Image (spheres, helix red, strand yellow):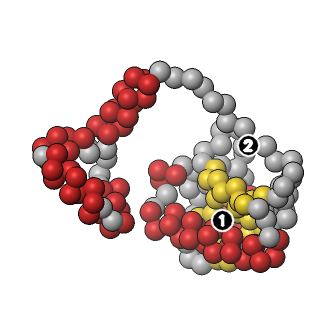
Amino acid sequence: MDECSLCKISENIVPSFKIYEDEDIVCVLNIFPSNPGHILIFPRRHVERIELLDDETLVKMIILAKRLTNVLQLIFKPVGYLLSINTFREYEKSKHIYLEVVPRFEEDGIKVILPRRKVELNELEALRNKILEYLSFKEEKKEETKQQEEKEKADIDINSMLKWLRKEI
Ligand SMILES: [Zn+2]
């Protein structure tokens, strides 16, 4: 992608302050940081949407973000972090997906404002049912007895969760 600044960083066409790179991911300091220690992590190949990113690369990005928060904690002692994944930003020239890690400090002036809209509970119920239907999870549940469901809840672990998440949708 000729116009993509992250691809240019990835290919060393433009200089950057790299923290980590391997065959799949690249991690740099943001040159326009919102706060000290503002870091960007992105896939080496040009991917614009999270649904097109392979699971392994996404997991690597998140694990690196977690490790970096441990380091940033020692350097800056922030009160917390904002972690966000920016995926397909229509308004930006460069649409390469990235995960950003922004250390947060008391009164740092950063405002993340998501509007809180009021909805009816039955709308949420309908939406949940629709999502579960698409996930092919609801139908499986119907076939099980309540007792089995209880047992499954008790037995749930990260492996079964991952197995479920990896199912074809
Ligand atoms: Zn790119």
- Residue 134 badge: none
Q: Is residue 65 left or right of residue 24?
A: right
- Residue 41 badge: 1
Query: Can see residue 55?
Result: yes
Residue at the spot of label 2: 112
For disc 1, the neighbor class at 10 Å (few under 14, some 14 to 19, many from 20) is many
The amino acid pointed to by label 1 is Ile
Q: Is residue 56 left or right of residue 86?
A: left
- Mark 1 vs mark 2, CA separation in Å: 20 Å
Above or below, 68 relative to 42: below
Q: Nearer the viewer, mark 1 or mark 2?
A: 2
Q: Secondary structure at mark 1?
A: strand
Residue at left 63%, top 75%?
67
Residue at left 52%, top 63%?
58
Q: Position of residue 146 (x, y in %)?
A: 16, 45
Mark 1 or 2, nearer chain start = 1
Q: Is residue 38 left or right of residue 128?
A: right
Q: Closer to the camera, 60 or 132?
A: 132
Residue at left 29%, top 52%?
168
Q: Secondary structure at mark 2?
A: loop
> How many numbered markers are drawn?
2
Q: Closer to the camera, 15 or 55?
A: 55
* Disc 1: residue Cβ within 8 A of ligand 1's nearest atom: no
Which image quarter: residue 132?
top left
Q: Position of residue 121 (x, y in %)?
A: 44, 25
Above or below, 82 relative to 68: above
